[in-house]
Image: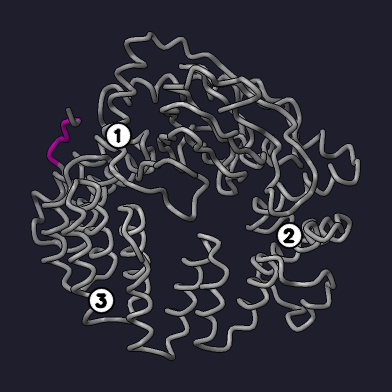
């Protein structure tokens, strides 16, 4: 039940809603914005805010987005989020028709194509990116549209199709990226000379990966260290770890530390069974997001730990207490990304559930926007742990770099076990046989400003 809100002025209610939203108290945020809209029912911005808060809190939001769309005609952000809400509430067909109708009139709307492609991909459709091809036929000179299409294709590592897309225009940096990531580029760092002086962090990351792929960790280290202290440094710390490991530098041990922990939450079997049933009901997609690490399974959308269901709320309180205890046990370290950004308050920059089928796994990845990352095991196959099957592999670098480094640590899942580790740590899962591996996971947001715990 949502919290009651006293009669207040609209500005006061909006401030209460925004404060509760920042604290990730979605029930209070929704109650406050509901009360504000009751006093100003025709206010366009408040109507959108109300729909968005309800959607993020996992409350019914489709009627609210319908009203917001009426009050904000033509607002692309509302249309996009309305489509996402429709898909979330089991109206995927209506969501795609909504986007298709608008794109038929506005073929250059890049975010609309991105959203439609995601909905079609996760629905398991054939040719989910076809709206891009159709739009480029109408607008052959639209560079933004071509680049968005390219990025969608390379997320699935379809290098041949990506080369065809680049034939629609002159995109030297994208061609360079494609050559490097597909393995077609030679080892000479001079291939980047034409882009010298660029401040693009994506180009810097490409150079780091290229140097590592071609056996030059010393060059990769210099390039990665140049990004420290910038707003993008979270993307580069994991590569510093790989450089140091390849070079036998003790700083790899300093970075990885003894920070990983596996904590048994002692959840009763009945609770685990109830969670499993609840989570399965949220897995409505037929295929994973191509940009994410899931292979052979599905992942939920929205921030799962903001769900208003009492089962999730109780689990969130337990998780927050465990994370606070883990945080308080960490040492101090002003120059360490984990130790220097301990959050005073636990907030979740993302949380989700993953359901893997037999043979499924997570590819090696990190979470650059997080402070600490996790895996909470709800259902694990019986053979988990045999030859590391189904285990969480920490320190496992991306295989496409060909570094010859293996995992530094394995964590064996069991129902109710929570693994916590720095978000900069490379991690993935070992494929397994069996019917189902069901987990919850979250990223804890870092402390960005102010005092640390």
- Can you tell which quarter of the image residue 112 is in? bottom left
Residue denoted by label 2: 209
- Can you tell which quarter of the image residue 68 is in? bottom left
Q: Quadrant of the C terminus?
A: top right
Where's residue 247, x and y in %?
A: 90, 46
Q: Is residue 257 visible?
A: yes
Range drawn in magenta: 3-7
Q: Residues within 10 Å of mark 1 (few under 14, many from 20)?
A: many
289 in relation to 150, above or below: above
Mark count: 3
Q: Quadrant of the N terminus?
A: top left
Given this view, does label 1 or label 2 mark the residue nearer the observer?
2
**Left of 215 or right of it: where is 439?**
left
Q: Secondary structure at mark 2?
A: helix
- Residue sitting nearer the eye, 43 or 241: 241
Residue denoted by label 1: 307
Q: Residues within 10 Å of mark 2 (few under 14, many from 20)?
A: many
Where's residue 415, x and y in %?
A: 46, 17
**Left of 347 or right of it: where is 253?**
right
Residue 183: in magenta span:
no
Identify the residue shown where x is 39% and y is 25%. 316
Distance from Cα at disc 3 to Cα at disc 1: 32 Å
Q: Main secondary structure of the magenta part?
A: loop
Where's residue 14, x and y in %?
A: 24, 49
1 or 2: tag closer to the N-terminus:
2
Tell me the tag on residue 103.
3
């Amino acid at each position: 039940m949502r919290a009651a809100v006293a009669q207040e002025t609209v500005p006061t209610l909006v401030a209460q809603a925004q404060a509760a939203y920042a604290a990730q108290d979605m029930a209070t945020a929704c109650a406050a914005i509901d009360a504000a809209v009751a006093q100003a029912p025709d206010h366009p911005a408040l109507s959108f805010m109300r729909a968005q808060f309800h959607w993020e809190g996992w409350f019914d939001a489709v009627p609210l987005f319908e009203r917001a769309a009426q009050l904000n005609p033509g607002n692309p952000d509302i249309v996009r989020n309305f489509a996402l809400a429709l898909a979330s509430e089991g109206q995927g067909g209506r969501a795609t028709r909504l986007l298709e109708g608008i794109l038929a009139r506005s073929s250059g709307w890049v975010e609309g194509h991105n959203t439609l492609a995601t909905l079609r991909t996760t629905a398991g459709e054939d040719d989910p990116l076809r709206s891009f091809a159709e739009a480029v036929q109408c607008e052959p000179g639209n560079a933004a549209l071509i680049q968005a299409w390219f990025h969608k294709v390379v997320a699935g590592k379809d290098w041949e199709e990506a080369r065809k897309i680049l034939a629609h225009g002159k995109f030297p940096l994208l061609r360079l990226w494609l050559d490097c990531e597909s393995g077609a580029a030679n080892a000479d760092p001079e291939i980047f000379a034409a882009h010298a002086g660029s401040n693009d962090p994506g180009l810097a990351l490409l150079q780091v990966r290229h140097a590592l792929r071609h056996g030059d960790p010393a060059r990769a280290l210099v390039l990665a260290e140049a990004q420290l202290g910038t707003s993008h440094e979270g993307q580069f710390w994991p590569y510093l770890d790989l450089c140091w490991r390849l070079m036998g530098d003790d700083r790899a041990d300093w970075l990885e530390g003894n920070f990983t922990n596996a904590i048994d939450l002692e959840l009763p079997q009945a609770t685990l069974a109830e969670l499993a049933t609840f989570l399965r009901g949220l897995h409505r997609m037929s295929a994973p997001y191509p940009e994410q690490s899931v292979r052979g399974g599905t992942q939920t959308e929205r921030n799962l730990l903001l769900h208003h269901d009492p089962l999730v709320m109780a689990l969130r309180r337990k998780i927050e207490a465990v994370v606070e205890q883990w945080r308080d046990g960490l040492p101090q370290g002003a120059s360490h990304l984990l130790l220097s950004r301990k959050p005073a308050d636990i907030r979740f920059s993302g949380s989700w559930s993953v359901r893997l089928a037999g043979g499924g796994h997570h590819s090696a990845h990190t979470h650059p926007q997080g402070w600490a990352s996790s895996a909470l095991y709800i259902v694990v196959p019986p053979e988990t742990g045999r030859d590391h099957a189904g285990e969480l592999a920490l320190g496992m670098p991306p295989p496409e770099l060909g570094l010859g480094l293996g995992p530094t640590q394995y964590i064996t899942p069991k129902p109710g076990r929570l693994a916590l580790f720095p978000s900069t740590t490379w991690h993935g899962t070992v494929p397994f046989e069996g019917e189902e591996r069901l987990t919850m996971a979250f990223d804890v947001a870092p402390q960005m400003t102010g005092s640390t715990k």
